[in-house]
Every structure is written in C-alpha cells, then in structure tokens.
Amino acid sequence: MLLKTFGWSFAVTALGLVAAVFYGGWEAFGVVAILAVLEISLSFDNAVVNAGILKKMNAFWQKIFLTVGVLIAVFGMRLVFPVVIVAITAKLNPVDAVHLAFADKDRYQQLVTDAHPAIAAFGGMFLLMIFLDFIFEDRDIQWLCWIERPLAKLGKVDMLSVCISLIVLLITSFTFATQAHQHGGAHADKAQTVLIAGIAGLITYLVVGGLSGFFEERLEEEEEREHEEEEEAARTGKKKSAVLLAGQAAFFMFLYLEVLDASFSFDGVIGAFAITNDIVMMALGLGIGAMYVRSLTVYLVRQGTLDDYVYLEHGAHYAIGALALILMVTIRYEINEVITGLVGVVLIALSFWSSVRRNRALAAAGAGSGEKAEVSSGV
C-alpha cells in the first residue's frame, strides 16, 4: 500500500536528485533536497485539506489528481508560474522572461520578490475564505468548542465570511496607502495592486468553490433520487445521468483543488528564493515536495485517516487561517519561512493529539458501558 501510493514520489525523488547532481554537482543535490523538505513542511496542511475533498471523488479522478494534477503543480506552479509573474511584472514576453531566469538570476529573483504583494494578496484572500467558510459552518464534531460554537452561530449571517475577508483586504491595502503617503507615494501602486489582487482571489474562490459546491449538491440529490427509483430503473432498464453529474462535480472539485494548491504554493515559491534563485534547482526541489504532498493526500484518503482522527481537518483549516494571515502580513513585513511551516505543523500535531485522546476516551466509554459517547477534546 505504501509503495503503491508513494511509488511515483520515490521515483521522482531519485530522478530529481540525480538530475541535480548532473546539473550542479553535490551542492545542487543539497539545495534540491532542502527545497523538497521545505515544500513538504509548508504544505502538510494542504495535504490534509486536499484529502477531505479528494475522498469525495472516485478512483478515476484520484488518478487524474496524481497525474494531470501533478503536471499542473510541478510544471505549472513551480516552474511556469514564477516565469509568468516575471513576464507580467517586467512587461516581458515569456521567452525573454525564461532567458532572464537563466541569464540574470539576481534580476529574476528581484522581479519575483517585487510581485510578492500581489501574490500574497491573491493567495491570502483565497485561503482566508476557505478558513472562514469552515469555521462559520455548524458541525456535529467540534475541536475547540469554545471558539467554534459561537462562530457557528455567527455563521448564520449571510455572506459574513465575504464581509470579513473584504475588511481584512481593505485594512491591508489601507496600510500600504498609509505607508505610501509617509514615503512620498512610493508604494501607492502596490496598494492598488494589493486591492485588485485580493479581490481577484476572492472572486476566484467564489466562482470555483461555488461551482464545485453546486455540482456536489446536484450529485447528492441525484444519488438520493437514484436510491428511491432503484426498482423502477431496474424494471425499465433506463440509465440515469449520475455518471455525468459525478464527472461535472469531480471536474470542478478537481479545479478547486488545483487553485487551492496554487494558493498554498505561493509561500513555498517565494520562500525558495531565500535558498536559491536558480530556476532549475527550484523546480526540481519544489516539484519533489509537491509529489509527496499529493501522494500523502491519496494515502490519507485510502487509509481513512480523516475518519479515524476527526480533528485533523480542523487543525488543517486553522493552519490555513494562520497561513492566510501570514501571507497578508508579509505584504509589508518579512516573516521567516520556518515560522510559517512550524505554525501549520504545530496546529496539525495538536489536532492529531486531540483526536487520539478522543478515540481513547470513546474506547474507554465503550468498554465501560458498551456504548460510544461523544467527548470534547478539551484543548
């Protein structure tokens, strides 16, 4: 099971490290290995959230996620995306941007760094919406009850998550505007860029998330109808359109996963420049890390880990909320990538520990009374 799920990741790791040695020697080998570890540590919460979505998809779409999705993640976000950012920022055509990445690495790094406010605003708003929609939803299982219960009640207010996200965006862009005024307007353009990019991230979430949710609901309705009409369908021999709806639902959920992965990868791509500005080594290292994140996602789904450790999804979404705020803060202030990675790891570790405590308490209650009793984590 382990080899089947992580086989491609192991193969890509071997090929990537060998390629690094041929490209730049053992120094490149070390840099690529560090980048891979950086990507995995920053994106573990991504895997947990992805697993919560991927478990709703059939085996075919899980394979698509591991094949086409990997191509998009590795070559799209880790290789093409930085080049596109440079092309837009420097107003260059893609060919010149690629040439710049190889010929003038310092200039290339500077251009990507200059584009960070727009990247952080887009990704921060997208991730913030994911966190808010999760925390405002009334759930049967709650982790931090003292926080989640009152927030679930507030969540009954329509569009509350959108309003809060826009307030955060306005505060962030206003901070840039204030800084621009204090420095003679040097950052005025960035303030406007932050606002536009943040709105784009919000719109992207609403469109992609709305479409995936719409088709998911259609699929659930169709499954209920199929169950009710099962005898009639067997008698008449008519085939229902459930497969088509499943395909539509899975497609938009897949699209949602790719946008989610893109938002998670922003901090990894930017943080990679703290280690190297070589686009080849960056693509190799981050690509290896992205493969493990995807394999881990599938492993969590097939092992039923989220069902066994029910607070893991909560911890991952809290990590998403923390990452969203960190991205917004990094628009003006620099935050070390180690802190970003540790925040997510600590939150997920706490949620795992709470899940283990819950399972032990349920087992003890079942052994004592023969019945399972729901317990709170007490975190």
Image (tube, rainbow, N blue to C red):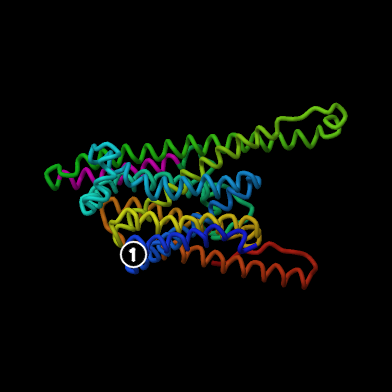
What residue span does the magenta drawing correspond to?
162-181
Q: Residue at x 62, y 62 (%)?
A: 309
Residue position for label 1: 28
Magenta region includes residue 165: yes
Q: Quadrant of the N terminus?
A: bottom right
The x and y percentages for residue 243 are 69, 35
State the SS at label 1. helix
Q: Quadrant of the C terminus?
A: bottom right
Residue located farthest toward the left when viewing the structure as drawn: 184
Q: How many marks?
A: 1
Q: Residue at x 65, y 64 (%)?
A: 375
Question: Is 281 or 213 nearer to us in this picture?
Answer: 281
Question: Is 167 or 285 nearer to us in this picture?
Answer: 285
The x and y percentages for residue 178 are 20, 45
Q: Amino acid at mark 1?
A: Ala
The reply, left or right, for residue 279 in relation to residue 246 is left
The x and y percentages for residue 305 are 63, 60
The reply, left or right, for residue 4 in relation to residue 195 is right
